[in-house]
Image (cartoon, helix red, strand yellow):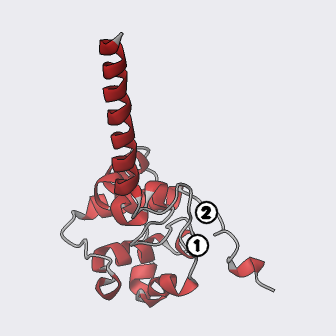
Amino acid sequence: MKVTAAALAVCTSFLALSIVLAQSQNSDKSPTGAVPKYDPAIYAELQKAPEKARNRTNPLQNDPDAVAAGAVLFEQRCAECHGDAARGGKKGPSLRAAEVQDATPGAVFWILTNGVVRKGMPVWSKLPEPQRWQLVRYIKSLGGTAPPAESPASKP
């Protein structure tokens, strides 16, 4: 009986310790389901794409494998900043916002290629061009969902 009680006490202690450690590791993370604040100024860089760049079309637009390949690249290179399924994260905005979804593929490609270094977006020009177009295809496939509460349409 004493052995069982001691084993139970040890297990309970380990369980409590595990919970405390898990909470301390997650304390710097935003709450599950939290959506980053919507700020239309973040997307102003898309408007800075030169006309020639904006007018470029995605050569992989009709490639049935481009979205899946872009999703893999996104997880490897972009999700850390832009969050799961491009909904936005600590460092990068949502790529589902209307400003991104309404931008031309060429403008999105231009941003990927040139980055926005002063705002933390790296330059991806060394990523092969077909992979950048796959990323564009994936991003554009996400459609859009209006940001909650602070979308321009919801303001009076």
Q: Is residue 45 left or right of residue 121?
A: right
The numbered disc on residue 25 is none
Most distant residue in the top direction: 1
Q: Residue at x 53, y 75 (%)?
A: 103
Q: Residue at x 57, y 70 (%)?
A: 97
Amino acid found under the numbered disc labelled 1: Asp
Q: Which residue is mark 1?
A: 102
* Residue 155 visible somewhere in the drawing: yes
Q: Position of residue 75 (x, y in %)?
A: 34, 53
Residue 91 placement: quadrant: bottom left
Q: Nearer the viewer, mark 1 or mark 2?
A: 2
Residue 151 placement: quadrant: bottom right
Q: Which residue is mark 2?
A: 144
- The vertical placement of 39 against 83, above or below, is below
Q: Residue at x 44, y 66 (%)?
A: 89
Question: Do the CB atoms of the residues marked 1 and 2 lie less than 8 Å apart?
Answer: yes
Would you call the spot at circle 1 few (<14 residues within 10 Å), some (14-19), or many (20 or more)? some
Q: As rendered, which of 50 and 78 lies closer to the eye?
A: 78
Q: Residue at x 29, y 54 (%)?
A: 76
Most distant residue in the right direction: 156
